[in-house]
């Protein structure tokens, strides 16, 4: 239990209720931060903890907070990204469902640190029950004086609102999330300006993932050194790895950053299901470039995966077995991105649909020799050339699958075509 | 100032400038579809990507601001590949129905394909089918298959008219621009949508299938339908040798002028151009005892009559009805010849009544030069007709193109009692028959001169169309008349063009001198 931060108390009955949470040292970090620490001290602690964003991009949270202008006359906002749309990812849902007060505690400290009085939790529309539980938790926090006008008598004021999305992957992209939260169509914004200076309602805004914010209370209680030691010096803490696919024991596993992928699959997720052999692993949510079975002896941290030309992303591990056709995998991926492209910019809107049409045709037996090269070209047209990261998110898995499983994919193309 | 390099060309630019603007300032064109200088950059078409030394990705020229020492390449292999990639995608899902598309010939997609593409399509899939003829407004047809989703139309309605009739619907390849629940685009600036559409997705009902853009000649003019003086292009058919066309003018387009109308014109100015061709008076009509007459003959006759009345000290029996469709130069001549030389006092303006202004460009004054007339010292309030017509022996009327609508009953009734009635008119109109002589006049679109708009800006205009038949510009007629009256030949002898008149006017009248 000692090596866990976020799921430490998972399994306690009614952990989502404030009294149970408080009995287990809940809200002690808020007390410590608000009564004994200056905002700058908190910022330094979070920076020193090397807490990298858990949503996928891995941007250091402390640095992000530091970008918010201190002297702005405008209101500042915190937006918690609970849209959790990356296929394979289901970690935030567990935190929100089992330990909502941990997130709320993190929100209070982050807001106090940056000088924010209003926070929004943008939650995936499908998480209806979770949203209701979260709202109950927020009400309880108000009742107990952790939210509202004068938190714990310190004069600090914070209101927290839950906003449910309407079901679009793109709204997990931070600027599309802001647009959606403002009541508009969820299209990503052109950057710069970045949200830290021009964000929600054109005000300075911090956007963090649920898991990122949920790590804050433990950093306050135990300090940055402890946090770094939990993971790696440059990439502190733990990650909640969500393992799905052909393993004996799928689920979430909170493990130190830098844990071996092989170990996660074999030891924690119980290895492959009876009679199944490993073919490939998607290590960080569907957007992450695929790893072949012989590439899984790798440490699960941002830098190691970049070196392996993949990415840690949301740490969602999708395990694929030998009986699964890579064409089917490709079909699912291309259909998803084609469906979820916001349609704003050309290479993504048409490129994804075009790729999807080709893959569908191959799957229906009408593949042609030149098809795979065309897909590569279209994916390269998207890579690094779209307005938001969705283009890259689509291109990366597609390119890696074709590169690593070309022989298999070609076998689906009728000879002579 | 900052030093930057575009395609190895060194240039100094102001900080805050975008790469696109910096490049355009030295004539380097960077292709773009969604960007329009009237709006904030949107960065969605991805056509303007350029390479910046030291940066891993291609960056947007439309939104990226220059930095000191920046080295930009707009023609590198990577840039060209990216442009081709965008074009390839756009064309893959485009109907390519250029042979029946009204935008053909002035379509950005066509132009860029010509410049960067000319590649064979590798799209072997089924294209998306979409609606091809949706009436999104009184004058507009939307073809969703041709739409490239640049969203200029949506932004125009959001940022300029603030009426927001169009929005973006659906997602991914199904994304489309449409009205909200069928409520049409309904504002006085809707025609601009067809013009800013870079492709043939929004076409003008008025222009659809009427002609091809390459048959048209665009010439500069000024819109005379209100006193804003919006700068326009008049697109006319030059007369293609193998067939005759039913009219000359096929459309009016905006001409950018940041001081007057920005990038836009109103729908009144855009669509009410039929008067340029319809019911034009092209020949001299003589309804009186004179059984024939040419311009010189009639000019001599009229000059003689005016001179006679003046000599007999009967200037009070001369009446002049004019309107503010006359240019500054023409009004200056009227002032000189009639008020100054002939002592005529009865000079009355017959302008259309004021109408509702909108809160953008359209003014309440429905003639172009009331301000100019005011600055030249004319009284513009309506006259007492009974007083005006009492004892009138000679009436000279300069009619506006819409004279039929403005000529009222008392005026028509009074005409019978007048001895000599001469009308200068651009159009065949019912009231014309009440005059002894009707002289064909050219329109503002057909002559040169200057106009003073509602806020006092003096703008020159030049012929955008050839005057039909025997039509003559008013200034020319007035100069010729003055020479036949022969009271001040030294003065009038110097006038050979509106410019020469303006030179003298600028010297004499302080307002025009200052406006120079």
Image (tube, grey):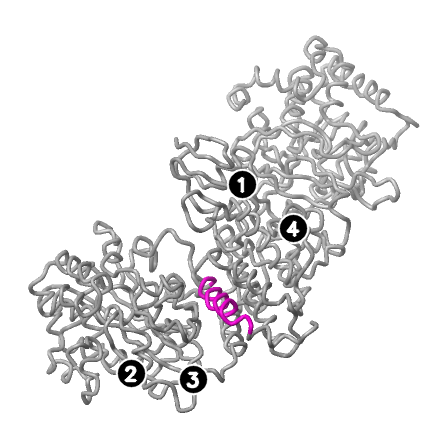
Q: Is residue B2 left or right of residue B414?
A: left
Say yes or no: labels 1 and 2 on the same chain: no
Q: Main secondary structure of the magenta part?
A: helix
Instruction: Specify whether residue A63 is in view.
Output: yes
Q: Which residue is mark 3?
A: A277
- Depth check: give the residue in front, B427 or A307: A307
Q: Which mark is residue A219?
A: none
Proximity of marks 2 and 3: CB atoms separated by less than 8 Å: no
Is residue A383 covered in magenta?
no
Read off the chain for label 3: A
Read off the chain for label 2: A
What distance separates the C-alpha of mark 4 from that of mark 3?
A: 47 Å
Query: Outermost residue, right direction?
Result: B291
Q: Is label 2 or label 4 in front?
A: 2
Say yes or no: labels 4 and 1 on the same chain: yes
What distance separates the C-alpha of mark 2 from that of mark 3?
A: 15 Å
Residue B71 placement: quadrant: top left
Residue B144 placement: quadrant: bottom right
> How many residues crowd around disc 1 within 10 Å: few (fewer than 14), some, or many (20 or more)?
some
Residue B222 placement: quadrant: top right
Q: Which residue is mark 2?
A: A267
Please tell me whether mark 2 sits on a helix, a strand or a loop. helix
Q: Which residue is mark 4?
A: B117
Q: Is residue B73 above or below residue A377?
A: above
- Depth check: give the residue in front, A390 or B332: A390
Magenta stretch bounds? A391-407
Instruction: Give the x, y percent position of residue B283.
Output: 85, 33
> How many residues crowd around disc 2 within 10 Å: few (fewer than 14), some, or many (20 or more)?
few
Instruction: Give the x, y percent position of residue A323.
Output: 49, 84
Proximity of marks 4 and 1: CB atoms separated by less than 8 Å: no
């Amino acid at each position: 239990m000692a090596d866990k931060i976020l799921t430490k108390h998972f399994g306690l009955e009614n952990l989502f209720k404030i009294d149970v949470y408080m009995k287990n040292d809940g809200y002690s970090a808020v007390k410590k931060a608000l009564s004994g620490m200056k905002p700058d001290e908190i910022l330094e602690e979070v920076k020193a903890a090397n807490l990298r964003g858990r949503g996928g991009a891995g941007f250091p949270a402390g640095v992000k907070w530091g970008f918010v202008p201190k002297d702005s006359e405008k209101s500042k906002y915190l937006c918690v990204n609970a849209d959790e749309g990356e296929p394979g990812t289901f970690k935030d849902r567990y935190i929100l469902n089992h330990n909502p007060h941990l997130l709320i505690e993190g929100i209070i400290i982050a807001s106090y640190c940056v000088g924010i009085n209003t926070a929004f939790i943008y939650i995936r529309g499908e998480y209806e029950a979770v949203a209701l539980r979260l709202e109950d938790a927020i009400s309880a926090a108000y009742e107990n004086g952790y939210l509202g006008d004068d938190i714990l008598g310190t004069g600090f004021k914070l209101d927290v609102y839950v906003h449910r999305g309407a079901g679009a992957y793109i709204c997990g992209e931070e600027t599309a999330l802001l647009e959606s939260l403002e009541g508009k169509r969820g299209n990503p914004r052109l950057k710069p300006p970045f949200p830290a200076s021009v964000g929600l309602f054109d005000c300075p805004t911090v956007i963090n993932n649920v898991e990122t914010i949920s790590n804050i209370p433990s950093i306050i209680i135990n300090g940055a050194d402890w946090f770094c030691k939990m993971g790696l010096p440059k990439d502190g803490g733990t990650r909640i790895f969500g393992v799905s696919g052909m393993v004996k024991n799928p689920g979430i596993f909170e493990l130190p950053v830098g844990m071996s992928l092989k170990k996660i699959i074999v030891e924690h997720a119980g290895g492959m299901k009876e009679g199944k052999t490993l073919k490939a692993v998607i290590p960080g949510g569907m957007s992450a470039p695929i790893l072949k079975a012989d590439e899984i002896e790798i440490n699960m941290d941002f830098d190691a995966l970049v070196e392996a030309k993949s990415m840690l992303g949301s740490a969602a591990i999708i395990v694929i077995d030998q009986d699964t056709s890579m064409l089917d995998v490709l079909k699912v991926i291309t259909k998803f991105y084609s469906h979820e492209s916001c349609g704003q910019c050309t290479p993504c809107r048409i490129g994804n649909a075009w790729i999807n049409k080709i893959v569908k045709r191959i799957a229906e037996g009408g593949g042609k020799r030149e098809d795979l090269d065309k897909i590569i070209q279209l994916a390269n047209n998207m890579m690094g050339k779209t307005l938001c990261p969705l283009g890259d998110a689509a291109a990366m898995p597609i390119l890696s699958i074709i590169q690593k499983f070309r022989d298999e994919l070609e076998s689906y193309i009728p000879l002579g075509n | 100032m900052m030093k930057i390099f575009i395609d190895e060309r060194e240039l100094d630019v102001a900080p805050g400038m975008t790469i696109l603007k910096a490049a355009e300032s030295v004539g380097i064109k960077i292709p773009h579809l969604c960007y329009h200088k009237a709006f904030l950059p949107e960065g969605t078409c991805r056509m303007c990507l350029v390479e910046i030394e030291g940066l891993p990705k291609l960056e947007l020229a439309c939104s990226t601001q220059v930095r000191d020492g920046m080295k930009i390449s707009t023609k590198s292999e990577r840039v060209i590949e990216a442009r081709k990639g965008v074009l390839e995608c756009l064309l893959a899902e485009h109907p390519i129905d250029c042979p029946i598309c009204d935008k053909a010939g002035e379509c950005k997609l066509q132009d860029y394909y010509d410049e960067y593409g000319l590649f064979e399509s590798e799209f072997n899939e089924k294209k998306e089918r979409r609606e091809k003829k949706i009436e999104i407004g009184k004058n507009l047809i939307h073809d969703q298959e041709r739409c490239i989703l640049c969203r200029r139309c949506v932004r125009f309605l959001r940022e300029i008219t603030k009426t927001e009739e169009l929005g973006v619907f659906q997602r991914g390849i199904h994304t489309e621009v449409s009205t909200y629940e069928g409520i049409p685009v309904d504002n006085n600036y809707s025609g601009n949508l067809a013009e800013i559409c870079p492709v043939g997705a929004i076409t003008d009902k008025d222009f659809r299938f009427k002609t091809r853009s390459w048959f048209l000649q665009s010439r500069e003019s000024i819109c005379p339908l209100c006193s804003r003086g919006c700068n326009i292009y008049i697109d006319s058919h030059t007369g293609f040798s193998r067939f005759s066309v039913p009219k000359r003018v096929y459309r009016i387009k905006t001409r950018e002028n940041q001081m007057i109308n920005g990038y836009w014109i109103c729908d009144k100015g855009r669509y009410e151009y039929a008067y340029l061709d319809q019911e034009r008076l092209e020949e001299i009509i003589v309804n009186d005892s004179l059984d024939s007459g040419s311009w010189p003959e009639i000019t001599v006759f009229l000059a003689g009559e005016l001179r006679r009345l003046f000599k007999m000290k009967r200037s009070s029996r001369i009446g002049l009805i004019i309107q503010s469709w006359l240019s500054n130069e023409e009004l200056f001549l009227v002032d000189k010849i009639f008020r100054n030389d002939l002592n005529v006092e009865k000079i009355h303006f017959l302008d259309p009544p004021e109408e509702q202004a909108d809160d953008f460009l359209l003014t309440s004054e429905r003639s172009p030069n009331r301000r100019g007339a005011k600055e030249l010292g004319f009284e513009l309030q309506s006259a007492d007709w009974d007083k005006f017509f009492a004892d009138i022996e000679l009436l000279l009327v300069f009619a506006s193109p819409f004279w039929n609508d403005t000529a009222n009953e008392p005026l028509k009734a009074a005409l019978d009692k007048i001895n000599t009635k001469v009308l200068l008119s651009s159009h065949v109109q019912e009231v014309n028959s009440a005059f002894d002589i009707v002289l064909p006049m050219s329109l503002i679109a057909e002559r040169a001169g200057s106009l003073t708009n509602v806020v006092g800006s003096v703008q020159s205009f030049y012929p955008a169309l050839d005057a039909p038949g025997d039509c003559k510009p008013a200034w020319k007629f007035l100069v010729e008349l003055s020479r036949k009256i022969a009271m001040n030949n030294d003065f009038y002898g110097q006038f050979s063009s509106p410019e020469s008149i303006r030179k003298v006017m600028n010297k004499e009248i302080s307002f025009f001198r200052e406006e120079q």
